[in-house]
Image (cartoon, helix red, strand yellow):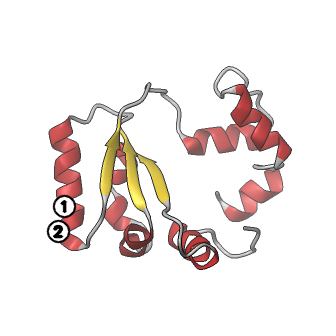
Amino acid sequence: MNTDEISYTYRTLQKLHAAHPDDTFYFIMGADSLAYFINWVHPEIISSLAILLVVNRGNYSINDLTAMADEINGLFPADIRFLECPKYNISSRYIRKALCDGFDMQEQLPPEVLAYIRQKELYHIKKYHEKQI
């Protein structure tokens, strides 16, 4: 979705939901993001439009994750599910900035992901600095 407005997650999900009202959406985030999710812009809207899939990339225990989910659900309903997957010590923000700055990310990203990014011409310098992805 190309737009000149700030790309808040809740706005993107609202547009996706309007375009595909019968689809189920999932929003993947790291456990570190879940820790401050209640401070995001309209987390209640995000939670109402998507199932939250949380990847534990930090040193959070299942008790820590459950406590975070319980705190969020105490404020507004959220379907939060935890995923187990290999841990990579790299953030999406770092990947976007590195690609924008022209760094070769072949060792950090699967070939299919890098090919998709290149095909769709994502993360150009101008786009990154203007919109602060």
Task: Using residue 99 as the reference point, say whether residue 48 is left or right of it.
Answer: left
| Residue wearing tag 2 | 74
Mark yes or no: residue 35 visible: no
Judge whether 105 appears above or below 75 on screen: above
Which quarter of the picture shows residue 36? bottom left
Q: Nearer the viewer, residue 93 or 56?
A: 56
Amino acid at the residue labelled 1: Glu
| Residue wearing tag 1 | 71
SS label for mark 1: helix
Judge whether 103 appears above or below 54 on screen: above
Q: Residue furthest front?
A: 22
Task: Using residue 96 as the reference point, say whether residue 103 is left or right of it.
Answer: right
Judge whether 96 appears above or below 102 on screen: below
Mark yes or no: residue 110 visible: yes
Spot occupied by residue 58 in the image (x, y as percentages of width and height): 34, 33
Q: Nearer the viewer, residue 125 or 22?
A: 22
Q: Residues within 10 Å of mark 2 (few under 14, many from 20)?
A: few
Label placed on residue 120? none
Q: Nearer the viewer, residue 86 or 96?
A: 86
Amino acid at the residue labelled 2: Gly
Which quarter of the picture shows residue 56? top left
Look at 25% across and 73% down and name the residue there.
Answer: 76
Spot occupied by residue 1 in the image (x, y as percentages of width and height): 72, 67
Look at 47% across and 56% down and name the residue there.
Answer: 26
Q: Are marks 2 and 1 in contact (CB under 8 Å)?
A: yes
